[in-house]
Image (cartoon, helix red, strand yellow):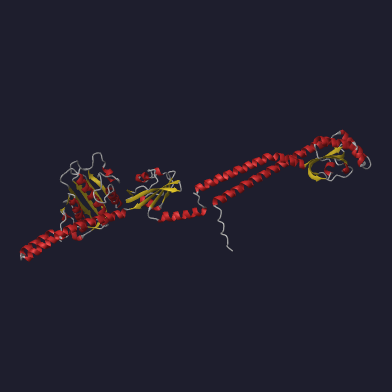
Amino acid sequence: MQRSAPRPPLRFSTQTLLLQLAVVLLVVLLSAAVHAWLTYDRVGSDAENQALTLARTVASDPEVRANVLAISEQPGTPPPAELLAGPLQSSAEAARTRTGALFVVITDETGIRLAHPDPQRLGEKVSTDPSEALSGQEITTRNTGTLGPSAGAKVPVYAPGTATVVGEVSVGYSMETVAQSVARDIGPVALTAAGALLAGILGSFLLRRRLQRLTLGLEPEEISTLVHDQVAVLQGVDDGVIGVSADGRVSVFNAAAQRLLELPDLAGTRWEDAPVPEQLKSLTRTGGGSPVEALELVAGGRVLVANARKALHRSEDLGWVIMLRDRTELQQLTRQLDAVGTMSTALRAQRHEFANQLHTLAGFLGIGQHQDAREYLARLAATGPLKFPVDQAELLQDPYLQAFVGAKGVEADERGVALRIGPETLVRGQVTEAQDVTTVLGNLIDNAVNAAVAGSSTDRWIELEVLDEPADDGGTLHIVVADSGDGLAEGTEAERVFAEGFTTASGPVRAGGGQGFGLALARQLARRRGGDVKVLERGTNGGPGAVFMATLPHTTAGNPAAATPGAAGKDENG
């Protein structure tokens, strides 16, 4: 026998709706029951008061008092036939008929009925205890007698002119009549209860829809799982994640975003008021739902790549998600790779010259010109087998700086710019932080080459001076770069050239090169080390151009060999 599949559990929103409906129904029924009971009790109290009034009226009637006294003074009780035809029965029935009471009963001092709606009950003792009324008390009661349940009152009958109790008058109104009266009054109560129930049902449906909208139709278990997944993902990735809700507030600002932007958690802050770079805010102002083209910016000493996407759930707009990726190390490695590539290109270019030199030497030896071969070797030993197009390159004692500046000299020479080393250059130590030095020095040289190429002077040149300041905890490297360009444009503030995205070039100056981040990155890196990059001179139109200076603390280490006599000659002559 095939077992049927278990029924899926009800959705949380459906359970909530049913629970609300049950609560509303329970409240309405309880309220209606309490109201019905209070109405029943009120109508019953009114019947008791009415019975008490009627009983007092009958008991105070002089004829009734005299007739009761007359019967009480007689030995025994008159027979029922005599009582039925007597004046007491007539008075009691007249009062009952006139007021619509269930019964009007008159007894003697022993509780024997002298008047009763049922003639067969005449001459019998009453079914309820008459002692309280016969003792002179007026009471109201609710009990069930021979005529059924009733709400009534008992009043003593006094002998004329005395305070002697000679009997009682008992009046009752049927509780069935009271129930009928309550039933008539309960109609509006029922309508009110039905209206309240309908309003509760409508409110429950509206609350269910709002709950589904707020939870995006997810169940509590799914929401709990999403929260755990969100925490695990947002706090576990190295990329910065910023969430901006549809109402313009920061909803997510993970730890990576705080680290990359060097900001505290901004969750709950208005996005337009958040202290983030303006470029990030511009990503969310496109108004479209397609991915926004990534942009680069410098923030917190890092080069970041940011892009933004619209967050949609079905057709509902949830806001924006902004992703931040750190490309600082990648850009630094790219610059180092560019430097290595430039040096490799220069070496390939020089390899041909070196091969020609070897062929020349082989030719001298082949024809027996040994003296000429020796003189040629001496010249090569004095100048070096390879020569970079950098004037006064011998002033750079550090081999790393020699190679890097030499490669930049080859690159500049290809663009028609001469790179020379200033006469004040003096580096006694060795570069220890090649990555930062490469980034800062490469950016300054590239910027100077661009300015020299774009300048109006026909004599295009760059002058570089490098000095180091020894220290026990690492020397400071001072770099000064000047060019033959036209300097800073009139009206351009010196600080503006360090803003990310600022450029005076109309397009890339080399393959794969972007604009507007070199100087900003160089300054950020220098300041992270406790140094700086600034403009020393603005330059003039027609040349010379602007002069930049960079200070890089803790980037060199002492080199005792550089201070000994002849050291320069050894490095120079190889």
Residue 499 locus on image (x, y percent): 29, 45
Instruction: Work out which residue is located at the far front of the displayed protein and give it.
Output: 1
User: Looking at the rendering, in which quadrant would you find the N terminus?
Assistant: bottom right
Q: Quadrant of residue 6?
A: bottom right
Q: Residue at x 56, y 55 (%)?
A: 9
User: Looking at the rendering, in which quadrant would you find the C terminus?
Assistant: bottom left
Residue 44 in view, yes or no: no
Classify residue 226 as left or right of residue 298: right
Q: Residue at x 62, y 44 (%)?
A: 197
Instruction: Name above or below for residue 510 compared with residue 561.
Output: above
How many labels, in total?
0
Residue 184 locus on image (x, y percent): 71, 39
Instruction: Name above or below for residue 527 compared with residue 69.
Output: below
Classify residue 425 as left or right of residue 167: left
Residue 240 locus on image (x, y percent): 38, 52
Instruction: Name above or below for residue 271 compared with residue 364.
Output: above
Instruction: Work out which residue is located at the far right of the displayed protein and give it.
Output: 75
Residue sitting nearer the eye, 281 or 345: 345
Q: Quadrant of residue 389?
A: bottom left
Residue 352 locus on image (x, y percent): 15, 59
Residue 31 in view, yes or no: yes
Classify residue 166 as left or right of residue 557: right
Residue sitting nearer the eye, 55 or 417: 417
Q: Residue at x 50, y 50 (%)?
A: 217
Classify residue 282 as left or right of residue 395: right
